[in-house]
Amino acid sequence: KYIVPSNDTTYYCKIYKAPTSYITKRHAIAYKILIDDENSDLVHHLLLHECNPSFTFDDNNLPYGVCDEINDKIEPCSASIATGWAVGGDHLIEFPEQAGYPVGLNSPNKYFMVQIHYDNPQQTSSTAR
């Protein structure tokens, strides 16, 4: 869980490593946005960035925190947006039958970054996912 600061706006970033345990090629065919109902009033939008495939992070110390405070650590993930979601959008997105997003074995992308924009006009601190 993440404690949303009592700022009007916060951009939180977290790097994730893609699955590597697959022994055959896999494709994601859908994605679902999970936001705790208790905190849905704070989440304005989120973006999933593909990190530069030639960059390797320390898997035991993947960067996370307020995006502006860790810019130097997340720079390899700032250029390419894979997908996004905003208030009012569908929480379940399914790809067309003939399409999929490669993950795991032989996928060029080994790391992804989730960037979440918290809109907090009441400027209250709250726990969010």
Image (tube, rainbow, N blue to C red):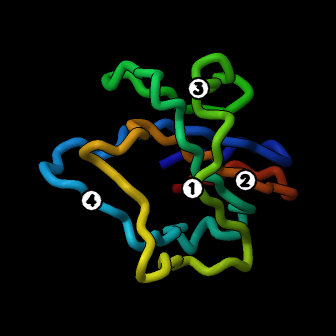
Q: Which residue is mark 1?
A: 128
Residue visible at 58% across and 53% down in the picture = 82
Q: Residue at x 65, y 17 (%)?
A: 72
Q: Are the residues tagged 2 and 1 within 8 Å (C-beta)?
A: yes
Tally of numbered discs: 4
Farthest residue to the front: give it: 98
Indicate the secondary structure of the residue bearing disc 1: strand
Residue type indicated by callout 3: Pro
Q: Quick check: 19 left or right of 95?
A: left
Q: Which residue is mark 2?
A: 118
Q: CA distance from mark 1 to mark 3?
A: 26 Å
Please give the residue where the numbered disc 3 appears in the rendered image.
Answer: 76
Q: Which mark is residue 26?
A: 4
- Dot 4 surroundings within 10 Å: few (below 14), some, or many (20 or more)? some
Circle 3 crowding by C-alpha within 10 Å: few under 14, some 14–19, many from 20: many
Q: Position of residue 46 (x, y in %)?
A: 65, 56
Q: Quadrant of residue 100?
A: bottom left
